[in-house]
Image (spheres, rainbow, N blue to C red):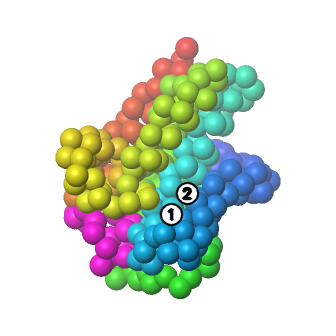
Amino acid sequence: MNWKTFWAMLARDAHVARRNAVQLFLQTFLQPLLFVFVFGRVMVGSGYMPTSYKALLLPGIIAISMVFTGIWAVAMPLIAEFQWTREIEDRLLAPIDMTWIAIEKVIAGMLQALISGLIVIPMAWLVLRPVEISIGSPLTFILMIVLVATFSACGGLALGCTINQQHIGLMFGMVITPMIFFGCAYYPWSALKNFPILQKVVLINPLVYASEGLRAMLVPAAPHLSTVAVIAALLFFDVLLLVVGLRQFEKKAIS
């Protein structure tokens, strides 16, 4: 393992992210914050939504921001590098194992997803205030956001190495949008109890565990899935998406 090469690649990706900070902000934060304002301030302030809804909404918005940031940060550059800029060829020629090139992409996406989550917490809180959130177990909270960030970056790796550039719109329409709306971000999983079949089907959506896990960490009084079950599920999806992503990356790189 050539660590010097690895850190050089990571530093370059960090530089590109800083250079595109404004664009990244608009892509990842604008929609969630608009949703927070409309449903958390306008609807609650007008009496159409109960005040308690603000506390339910905040963890879901954080989950969406982190997941969307991680997927975008990994998938879109990979699609571009493999299919039209061909920049990936320079990386493949670097003195480093192919697998570590993909892992570097995942780590870069994880860091961006973590930053996204840590930024959107105070921003959404300012929009929704007053809203009560608390972190009962800081270590469990750190573990949770790391697992969510890992899932988003590994998902970006799998999608970026699978989707062709002409299918980017399909990716958002058929994958990202359903994942968001059925990811329990805007409502707790228990709200689907009147739709028992749907309630079970959505458990294949990893965003469900991201939303429910952050809800358990920030609003423990709200209904949520078991923290142990959430951590186990996120670990499963992290490993699954990483394995699939690495396999697809290798297949794409060789072809």
Tell whether 17 sits left or right of 244.
right
Q: CA distance from mark 1 to mark 2?
A: 5 Å
Image coords of residue 121 (percent x, y): 55, 72
Closer to us: 109 or 222: 222
Is 220 one of the magenta-colored residues? yes
Closer to us: 195 or 106: 195
- Give the amino acid at mark 2: Ser
In the image, residue 250 above or below residue 96: above
Q: Element type at marker 2?
A: helix
Image coords of residue 184 (percent x, y): 37, 55
**Residue carrying label 2:** 65
Image coords of residue 33 (percent x, y): 62, 63
Question: In which quarter of the view is residue 31 placed?
Answer: bottom right
In the image, residue 10 above or below residue 218: above
Q: Looking at the image, which residue is at 44% across and 59% down?
A: 186
Q: Residue furthest top?
A: 255
Q: Residues within 10 Å of mark 1 (few under 14, many from 20)?
A: many
Q: Looking at the image, which residue is at 51% across and 63% down?
A: 62
- Give the amino acid at mark 1: Ile
Tags 1 and 2 touching, CB below 8 Å: yes
Q: Looking at the image, which residue is at 61% across and 46% down?
A: 73
Q: Which labelled disc corresponds to residue 62?
A: 1
Tell whether 249 sits left or right of 4.
left
In the image, residue 71 above or below residue 91: below
Question: In which quarter of the view is residue 172 placed?
Answer: top right
Q: Looking at the image, which residue is at 19% across and 46% down?
A: 196
Q: Element type at marker 1?
A: helix
Question: In which quarter of the view is residue 85 placed?
Answer: top right
Closer to us: 174 or 228: 174
Residue numbers of the magenta segment: 212-228
In the image, residue 174 above or below residue 113: above
